[in-house]
Amino acid sequence: MAESFEVVYEKGVFKPIKKIHLEEGTRAVVSVNRKELLKKLYQSIPLTTSKKSIDEARMDLLET
């Protein structure tokens, strides 16, 4: 079963923003979703766009 929760990475450790309910020692897979990068990406895409312009906008952001 998959769960999602927001974390912050500080001093080499992922720390949950809110209390989570997991047993001590539970192993998990972390998938990083950089909110700031995604927010900039989506704000740079016009409402009517093509896949090519989305890919171009994504590449522009990754180069900065």
Image: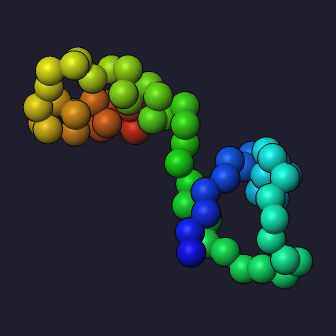
Q: Residue at x 79, y 45 (%)?
A: 17
The colour scheme is: rainbow
Residue 38: % across, % down: 45, 35
Question: Which quarter of the figure is the C terminus placed in?
Answer: top left
Q: Is 25 left, or right, of 44 in this rendering?
A: right
Q: Nearer the viewer, residue 28 or 19?
A: 19
Q: Residue at x 68, y 47 (%)?
A: 6
Residue 60: % across, % down: 32, 30
Residue 23: % across, % down: 84, 77
Count all numbered tags in the image, as a single digit: 0
Q: Is residue 12 visible?
A: no
Q: Is 26 left, or right, of 50 in this rendering?
A: right
Q: Is 23 left, or right, of 47 in this rendering?
A: right
Question: Which quarter of the figure is the N terminus placed in?
Answer: bottom right
Q: Residue at x 14, y 38 (%)?
A: 51
Q: Is residue 8 visible?
A: yes
Asked where in the image residue 4 lies, by quadrant, the reply is bottom right
Q: Nearer the viewer, residue 55 or 45?
A: 45
Q: Is residue 1 above or below residue 49?
A: below
Asked where in the image residue 50 lies, by quadrant, the reply is top left
